[in-house]
Image: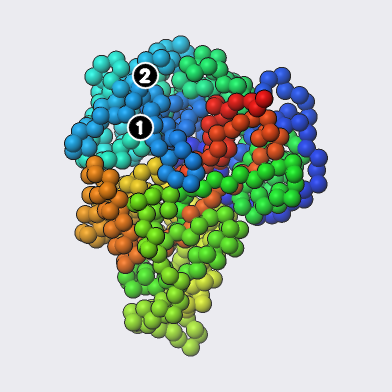
Amino acid sequence: MRNPQRLTTLAFLASILLVGTGCAPAAPGSGGAEPAQPSLALLTAALPETLNPLAGFDNNGTGKINESLYTLTGSSDRLPQITPLLAAGEPTVSADARTWTVPLRQDARFSDGTTFDAADVVASYEAIMDPASASPIFGTLSNVLDVKALDPHTVEFTLRESQVSFKTAMLIGVAPSEAIAPGQRVEESSLNREPVGTGPYVVDSIGPSRLVLVANPEYRDGEAALKRVIYEAAPDDNARAQRMLAGEFDGTVLPPRLAATFAANPEFEQVTATSADWRGLSLPAGNPLTSDPKVRLALNLAVDRQALVDGVLAGAGRPAHTFVPAEYGDAFDPAAVFAHDPQRATQLLDEAGWVLGDDSMRAKDGIPAAFTLMYNPGDVLRRDLSLAFSAQMKQLGIDVPVEAATFETAEPRAGTDAIMLGGGDTPYDVDTQLYKMLHSSYPATGAYYDNPSRFADPAMDRALETGRTTLDEAKRAAAYREVARLYVTEPSMVLLAFIDHTYIQRTSVSEAWAGTGTLLEPHDHGTAWGPWVKIGQWVPKQ
């Protein structure tokens, strides 16, 4: 689930305004002037508030400045593999999945000239785990009991509880121990604006609306062929589209409807990345309507997910019935779906005592069948999904007023009002996609948006715990299929869709460069992802 305090780059899905496509573009990445070195200019919705990996920057295994122990490899149509990067090989895992021993490579150096070793890993992880640092990704390592260096090139993690998915926690960027002050709050660190990493790029300059990276000349695999990457912030979607058409930039991220307006222009190509990024609404346990299990099931049967994908998302997405998309392979159960069945939904509501009145709206014992649905006011996509859901529910006789509310405003109301949520922060193991959203230990052990409906089922807990602790892949997959079967019998939320992320790139870029494709993307995305996720590995075409 997305933490609203995370400081990584966000790409806001917003305006669906249409623009013309008649402008003649200038030379890519140059604003009309020929660049001195190979460069790429990207227009992004927002720059990161921090470049500090201890505060969450570069924490999904694809860092360009700060690398992680492991990275993501694969394609967008399946769950990526988590493969060694700063690690020298696969971890050695104890039989109970509580002790993870990681060998480290010995040829990596930080951009300040210091050598990468076990002390850097220990210092980075301990800083995030220290409550005094107030790291936004503190919860990612909540299961870590201890991290220590066995020798300069070996690190050992000890977990409080067995966790087969722990490799996903080793996608966090590593900083040099020399730059980490124990007990220092992350917002006070010099790493926020002067990061020191082992990655293919270093910071050339950073300002309020512009970040420039240049190739690291000392990178162990050789200096990147793409020498300069410029990120410029423009929060408004329509403004980014217009500036792309004006020839100022090589690429940007846009909402699906706006990206579709470039389809007829041969100067541009649309790149669509599959994601495990879901949208759905909580069903508050303190509301008399949504606390009723029959009502929860009825809402899931009544909503027309495909209509939402076709309309609100312009086809750029897939209906979501559970938290697990098809890309998870054997852990995905294709039979675990809610058929669109308004007639059965009506029967369930009648059985639960929520009956239609003369005004065609439902009530029970004088209580209206109603709940408020809140959405982040800065997110037009969530607004549009909320409004579309509300319209569908009105046909069922349920009143769902929609209200813009900040996360701070929404949190104290989470027990009585619904929230349009998004999730899939680190979706590279099915455990990290499911556990916090369905295990009964949450939200008490997490945040209010973890298991926001306060769902509790002993059978669900057992299946989740089996999936988290067993090293037998077949048993893990079977456990997660059981989770899906249980969920569609008694849902805790209404999942709506997995969002495809849409990007626009000048065709001249793909003509000049052999790129690396896209990966299955997380909730947080933008120009650090898409076709540019691994730009340090791009090579020029001959």
Q: Nearer the viewer, mark 2 or mark 1?
A: 2
Q: Is residue 133 left or right of residue 113?
A: left
Q: Residue at x 48, y 37 (%)?
A: 8
Q: Is residue 194 left or right of residue 44?
A: left
Q: Residue at x 31, y 56 (%)?
A: 481
Which element carries disc 2, helix, strand or loop?
loop
- Label drawn at residue 105: 2
Tell me the quarter of the image containing the C terminus: top right
The one of 503 and 93 positioned closer to us in this rendering: 93
Residue 516 drawn above or below residue 77:
above
Q: Residue at x 42, y 61 (%)?
A: 321
At label 2, the amino acid type is Arg
Label 1 Cα neighbours within 10 Å, binned few <14 / some 14-19 / many ≥20: many
How many marks do you count on the picture?
2
- Please name the residue that numbered disc 1 is placed on: 170
Q: Is residue 510 left or right of residue 337?
A: right
At label 1, the amino acid type is Met
